[in-house]
Image (cartoon, rainbow, N blue to C red):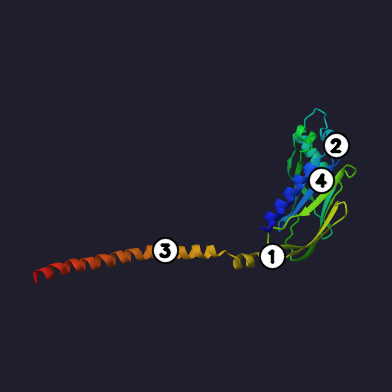
Amino acid sequence: MKRLLACVICAFASQATAAAHVLDEYVQAAQITLAPSGARVEIRLVPGVEVANRIFRMIDLDHDGQISAAEQQAYAQRVLLDIALEVDGRRAPLALAGVEFPSRREMNEGIGAIRLNLASEAPLDMTGEHQLSFRNYHLPKLSVYLINALVPSSSEIKISGQTRDPLQHEMRLSFHVNPHVSTANTEATKPWTGALWKGALMVGVCLVLLFPVWKQLRQNVRRRHDEQIPDSAAR
């Protein structure tokens, strides 16, 4: 529920930012998600109306008025060079997991968002306290920045603190990892409906097994009753 609420708030904030930011700024909003398998970062880059053409020309390397798949990848790699992720002071390289680019019309209207999905293969499953830092210095003269961390979906990871610099170029996260929590919580917090269904299943199995016995007993009782009727009539 907490994760869903955080996603809704972040989505609302992102939409509000895209609609209301200053026209001559390039809004770059990053969302960080932690999981035992590694960190994921989603970056949304929304150029304002007055800088949209400049950003478009920067991406459209052959100046044909279209952004090809190769140009999308090239720009994504350019962004990757300007950002950094570290875990416990060591570089955690980010790989491009997916890209999405708006049309030129959407960019010119200030409603087009470039989406970059990034993933780090550095595992976050070591027990204890850890530090994660994320930095974004892509096109600082044109841009404003937002950084948020989503509540981890895994109970093994708990965020204990976070700080940002005033311009939100950088975020530092403190988090604790306890691999044993997940199993314990899973067993301790199984919904009561699960137990109810198990109980109902056991009752059903018992009924199925007992039904032939009950049927046989009923037939025996009926047979004895039928045998007793002639004797009574004869007397």
Name the N-terminal-most of marks 4 and 3. 4
Tell me the quadrant of the picture where the C terminus can be found.
bottom left
Residue 130 image point, x, y percent: 79, 63
Name the N-terminal-most of marks 1 and 3. 1
Q: Nearer the viewer, residue 152 or 91?
A: 152
Q: Nearer the viewer, residue 233 or 92?
A: 233
Identity, as a three-letter code, of the amino acid under mark 2: Val
Name the N-terminal-most of marks 2 and 1. 2
Judging by the rendered image, the residue that carries numbered circle 2 is 51
Tell me the quadrant of the picture where the N terminus can be found.
bottom right
Name the N-terminal-most of marks 4 and 2. 4
Identity, as a three-letter code, of the amino acid under mark 3: Val
Q: How many marks?
A: 4
State which mark lies toward you, 4 or 1: 4
Q: Nearer the viewer, residue 188 or 39?
A: 188
* Residue at position x 79%, y 45% in the image: 17
Identity of the residue furthest to the front in this view: 20
> In this rendering, is residue 21 above or below 123?
above
Judging by the rendered image, the residue that carries numbered circle 3 is 205
Q: Check disc 2 and report its element: helix, strand or loop.
A: helix
Q: Quadrant of residue 18?
A: top right
* Residue at position x 66%, y 64% in the image: 182
Residue 42 image point, x, y percent: 75, 48
State which mark lies toward you, 1 or 3: 3
Identity of the residue furthest to the right in this view: 141
Judging by the rendered image, the residue that carries numbered circle 4 is 28
Identity of the residue furthest to the top in this view: 64
